[in-house]
Image: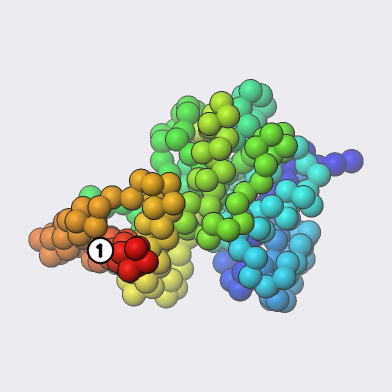
Amino acid sequence: MDPLATVVIPTRDRPGYLEVALGSIAPQAAPAGAEVLVVVDGVDPGSARVARRHGARVLELPAGPGLNAARNAAVESAAAPLLVFTDDDVRAPEGWLAAILAGAGRYPDDDVFAGPIRARLEGGRGPRGCGREAPPITALDLGPDDGEAPRAWGANMTIRRAAFDRIGGFDPAIPSGGGDEEDWQRRYCAAGGRVRYLGAAGLDHRRAGEDAELPRLARAAFHRGRLAREHDARRGEAPSPAREARTLAGCLVHTVCRRCAMGVVLSAHAAGRIRAAAGEHRSA
C-alpha cells in the first residue's frame, strides 16, 4: 500500500543536523501513514547511515546536482499523493506532520501548503539583535490561524503530486537560495494556484554551534544576498545599484547606532547584493 505522504529531506554533508531532523520527524511518519525519503546529494556515507538508522529510505544522487534536482528526483521516486518538503536543519515538534495532513484534508482545492518556520540559534554565543531586524535564517510567521500565504519556503513546504503533473518540476538550473522554490510557485500561481498557510504546522529552523555565531551567519548572508540579487535580475526586478548602496548604508547605520550585532548580518546580505550588481555591470 502506498503511503499517504512522503516527507522529503534533501541533504549534503550535514549528518549532525540530519540526526536532529530525523529524530523529530521519523517517529511521526509511521503513525501518520507516511514515509521519509532522504535525498543525499553526492558521496555522503555519513548522512546515508544516519538516514537508514532512523528507518528512512535513501536516494543517493551523483555529486553536485543541486537542491532542485534533488527535489525533482524525490518527486520521481515517491509514490505518495502528498510530498512534504523540509530541510536537514529543522526540528519538527510532535504533531507537525499530523497538522499538515489534516490541513491538506481541510483544503482539498489547494495544492501547496506553507507552515510557520521559527528561526532558532542554538548556543549562548550567537549575535544579539535589537529586535527590529529580521531573523538571520529563513523564517515565516503569519500567525496561529490558517489563511493564504504569498509563498511557501522549502523548510516547510507541502505540495500535492497533482500540481507537479500540471506545472512540471523545479528548475534544476536555479541554485539553492537563489529563488529555487519561488520560481516553481510563481508558475503555479500564474496557472491559478494558491498557497495555503497552516498555522498549526510549524517547525524550528536551526543553526547550532559555530553556524549560529556571527562570522558564519555573516558569510552565509553575503552568499544569500548575492544569489537573491541574481534571482531578481533574472526576473527583471533588480533594484538599481544606487538603491542597493542606500540599503547597505542603512544597515550600517542601524548596526552602529543601535549597537546591534545582528546588523552585521543584514549588512553582509546587502553587500552580497552589491557584489552581484557589480558583476552585472562588468558583464554589460
Q: Residue at x 78, y 41 (%)?
A: 80
The chosen color scheme is rainbow
Q: Residue at x 25, y 63 (%)?
A: 267
Q: Residue at x 59, y 71 (%)?
A: 14
Q: Position of residue 283 (x, y in %)?
A: 37, 66
Q: Which one is in front, 33 or 276?
A: 276
Tally of numbered discs: 1
Label 1: how many residues lie within 10 Å, few (<14), some (14-19) or many (20+)?
Answer: many
| 204 to 79, vertically: above or below | below
| 43 to 188, vertically: above or below | below
| 189 to 233, vertically: above or below | above
Q: Position of residue 30 (x, y in %)?
A: 77, 47
Looking at the rendered image, the quarter that the N terminus falls into is top right
> Helix or strand or loop: what does disc 1 sit on?
helix
Q: Which one is in front, 2 or 267?
A: 267
Q: Residue furthest right?
A: 1
Q: Residue at x 39, y 50 (%)?
A: 232
Looking at the rendered image, the quarter that the C terminus falls into is bottom left
Judged left or right of residue 53, residue 111 is left
Please state which amino acid type lies under the numbered disc 1. Ser
Q: Position of residue 48 (x, y in %)?
A: 73, 70
Q: Residue furthest front?
A: 284
Q: Position of residue 86 (x, y in %)?
A: 59, 52
Q: Residue furthest left?
A: 257
Residue 217 appears anywhere in the view: no
Q: Which residue is mark 1?
A: 267
Residue 161 picture quarter:
top right
Q: Which one is in front, 156 or 248?
A: 248
Residue 70 appears anywhere in the view: yes
Q: Which one is in front, 105 or 158?
A: 158
Judged left or right of residue 144, residue 96 is right
